[in-house]
Image: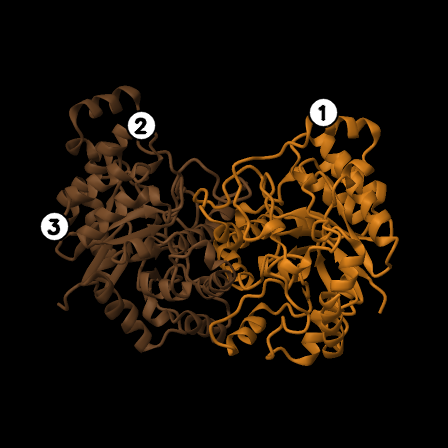
Chain colours: A orange, B brown
Amino acid sequence: MAVQATRMMDALDASAKTKTAIIDCDVHAYLGEGTLKRFLSPFWRQFYADHGRRSYDGSHYPRAVPQAARHDAWPPDGSIPGSSLSFTQEQLIDAYDLDNAILTPLAGAGEILNLDFGLAASQAINDWQLEDWTSKDSRIKGSLIVPYESGELSASEIHRLGSHPDFVQVLLIARTREPLGQRRYWPLYEAALEHNLPIAVHFGGTGGYPLTGAGWPSFYIEDHAGMSQSFQAQVTSLVSQGVFELFPDLNFVLIEGGFGWMVPLMWRLDATYKKLHKELIRVKDLPSNYIRKHFWISTQPIEEPLEDHQFMEMMEQLDMADRLMFATDYPHWDFDSPDRALPNSVPAETRKMIMSENARRLYDLPG
Amino acid sequence: MIDCDIHNEVPALSALYPYLPEHWVDYCEESAFDGPDADDYPETMATTYHPDYRRFFVDEAAPRTQDRVELIRDLVLDKWGITTGILNPSYRIHAIQSLDLAVSLATAVNTWQAEEWLSKDSRFRASLVVPSQNPVAAAEEVRRWRGHAGFVQVVLPVRSRMPYGNRNYDPMFSAIEEAGIKVAISFGGAPGNPPSGVGWPNTYFEIYAGMAQIFQSQVMSMVYEGLFDRFPGIFVVLLEGGFIWAPSLMWRMNKEWKGLRHNVPWVKELPSEYIRRHFRWSMLPLDASDNDLQNQEILNQMGGEDLLLFATDFPHWHFDSTHSIWPDYMDKGVRHKLSLTNPQSFYNLGID
């Protein structure tokens, strides 16, 4: 009881401090025990029981904490963090009075090697989001899970549910089997665009390759920090393969990759483009122009410069204040609290855009 | 003035025959093997040769080492008044799967450098190539040249089979530390694994631009895996990977360390402190923006005036004119540091 009371006091305290509207673009919902089975058809339920779910191996780094979760994020009923709607409401959505919470379920469906089962699992996870989350709380929006290594199967799932108002984007994982600009993913983009859905790319996953272009690192800290290099490879591929010439209205959302690297990446791509542009047969513009037009980026984790004034230098260089979207990454250990995530140097108007208005615009959420 | 990155490429495998054991010469002749298959610098790509230099390379009928020596004397040392030029061949020993051949080729390339470069001009210094895929063999090659004043560092390709912080490399770094020479990590490599964590890209553009991320991965590995705690005498210069990403990498690495330092308890200081102490960057490519104020900000954020080393990167096309090798945003004081005091102190070069 005492713990509950303290949590409520914290929540009241937090909501009093937080005056600006907040949309959280990275809220993890996890499948609880037995949930996947509940949403699979009898055929796939049996298949799952007989064969399990097989994925890539060789990428196991013990996380810092169980489920990579905050110690206080374990629901009182003993279920895993992020699996209880009521506890997520209490600890996050109500506590910080969020306008909206965008669910980013990390259920690994896209990494299932058997693509047919990957599709079945994706469908189950999407149905679960509707039934257990979005239909019970209108503040919560879902992300369509797809078996992204097959553009065609992904398109079929996007066509099944892509126009449901509770889904605001398609969700991929940063480490795919090939860079995302490659042809195999284009049917997925085409389908998403038909339903006017952005493509979100979230931290994590494994596509069966070492994390780095120099082989496997040894520790979780490297796996965690090193994901930003994979994000850079994805942005580079999307731009250089001409995806935005093929799909001029397509938007990408980069979630939990940080954004300090975006400035040097843009400069380097532009500089390289000036010399090697002839090889990029579909590209017609400077890479940075595509990036500023087609990419949106979630805030957490925010790079912390050595000196305070350097943060606003970076923001000026980035010139994407209209594209940054606040995220907590609840219930993970590296959670960013809405009332203290952004440095004090961020001006009020920019703060408002980042905390809510950019996401409201991208996802067309009610004001 | 000291130029920290001049490429002295092996013109043809046959140039190494005088320094290879006879059975390998026979083997190469019989098998038509013509050297490692790395394609870091495809001849057709714009970045591979500065437009002013391209004709010297692509029109070469039967390239000879002595012609290359002359070329570098004329176009680099004499032209820019370089007092010390550090040679750095991109010969990808680590791409040769047959270890015995790789070991012999490494020795041959190094002997070729000693005989046909270092002995020809006292302004030259050179970089040892080693079979880094086998750190014990690499250590032997480093020890073979211990005390040779011409070799100031070991050059490792940034693309590797395992990141360089991995403890498997300890025998190699131990030998390098004992020899008192530096480590250069250079653009490229052909280790066989993809150049990104998301597989193989389609274009050279992506591989070229993406090389910066592999440099970032190596910095992370070497700091987080404790290389500098095990070998405090190891100092690394990153060649031709750009430097503008250094500030954001330091910020990210510091932040991760605050959250996950129990993962790597040997890392006792902020990662940015290790980086500033143990890493230097060659200044090319600049990857500059059009806004010199912002270029200046990046330089200040990384403390670049103390960490960058001047380089022409001959014959690659990374500076925009043969008339001005400095960007406007670097003032006279910065230029002096980059071209003289920084490399002098990094390489312990005496003042001539």
Query: Mark 2, residues whose alpha carbon is within 10 Å: few (<14), some, or many (≥20)?
Result: few
Percent of width and height locating residue B195: 47, 43
Please check whether the numbered discs 1 and 2 fall on a single chain.
no
* Residue A263 spot, x, y in % from top left: 54, 64
Say whether residue A108 is left or right of residue B140: right
Chain name for mark 1: A
Q: Where residue A88 appears, x then y in whole percent?
A: 76, 59
Check the picture and name the quadrant holding the N terminus of chain A: bottom right
Query: Which image quarter holds the C terminus of chain A?
Result: bottom right
Direction from residue B261 to residue A28 in the image, left or right:
right
Residue A85 at least partly seen: yes
Q: In the rendered image, which quarter is residue B302 located in?
A: bottom left
Left or right, A295 with reference to B152: right
Question: What is the number of the mark on residue B98?
Answer: 2
Contact? badges 1 and 3 (CB < 8 Å): no
Mark seen at residue B147: 3
